[in-house]
Image: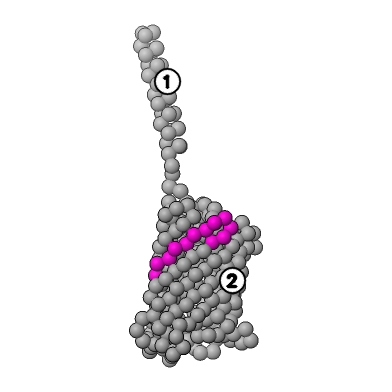
Amino acid sequence: MRRSVLTTSALLIVGLLTTGATASERDKAPPVTATDGGNALDRTPQGAFAVSAFGTPSANIGLGATSGVQTGTGTGRGSEFQGGMTIFGAPIDRLTLFGTGERRLDGTYAPSAGIILRLFGSRADGWALSIGGKYKAEGFADVGGETELGFFGSYARNGWHADANAVVGAGFEEKESDGEARFRLGYEVAPSVRVGIDGQARYRLAGSRTLAGGRHWDAVGGPQVAASFGHVYGTVTVGPSIVDVASGIGWTATASVGAVAW
């Protein structure tokens, strides 16, 4: 009887030790991890087209510059250039503010400003859903323009990064409205280097005026390379475009560079 009790006790001790070791190994196993937003690419709300639902972290501030060229616009002026400067920041958690001054493809210079409000999710969760609004003026001396309302979703886990946007815009004076779908997908081939695609498609929802070439829709996008070094980030996107292209297909190249405070 005594030997049986000793044997049973020994088996229980071995079982507990085995269970503890198994739990310890399980705790050490690498979990499915969310991108922690530790590099500058994760702290800027927009590269070329798609907007990140994560926004930028609380109390952060950043400055970015974008320059692009497009061929085949059919304007008779050869290649068209666009570009501008953007400042962005987050005064509180979940709220990102941004303002831009830019030269557009049609040659006009105009400002814009907007917000991104994160409703659900976070970097720690690896996903987020946000809403946002943007006002685009016709020019620096013209208060007329266009307002946009957007819904943004983002995913960042195990090296994969994806952003999907649905945006509706309407003009103040022209009685026209457009719908846009933007998408970005990238994968980390190195800790601070990503490769993927970025682009957008637009459709004229209302209004008598059509888009360039008599179309009701247009699109632009292509492969993208993004990298960061410390507080500095940069992206390059190259691909076909029919935005403001009267006939055929044009080509566009867009480069962005910027820096964040932390």
Instruction: Report the magenta stretch's main SS.
Output: strand
Per the model, the C-alpha gap separating discs 1 and 2 is: 64 Å
Residue 214 seen in this snapshot: yes
**What amino acid type should be assigned to the residue bearing mark 2?**
Thr
- The residue at the point 43 percent across, 76 percent down is 252
SS state under label 2 = strand
Label 1 vs label 2, nearer the camera: 2
Residue 200 pos. (x, y %): 42, 73
- The residue at the point 63 percent across, 63 percent down is 61
| Label drawn at residue 105 | none
- In the rendered structure, which disc, 1 or 2, sits on the residue that comes first in sequence? 1
> Taking 195 as reference, is 99 above or below it?
below
Q: Give the range drawn in magenta.
A: 222-233
- The residue at the point 59 percent across, 79 percent down is 111
**What amino acid type should be assigned to the residue bearing mark 1?**
Ile
Instruction: Tell me the residue that label 2 is attached to.
Output: 86
Asked whether the beta carbons under mark 1 and mark 2 sit within 8 Å of each other, the answer is no
Residue 230 lies in the magenta stretch: yes
> Taking 24 as reference, is 48 above or below it?
below
> Taking 185 as reference, is 210 above or below it?
below
Q: Residues within 10 Å of mark 2 (few under 14, many from 20)?
A: many
Residue 11 pos. (x, y %): 37, 19
Q: Tell whether 12 sits left or right of 228.
A: left
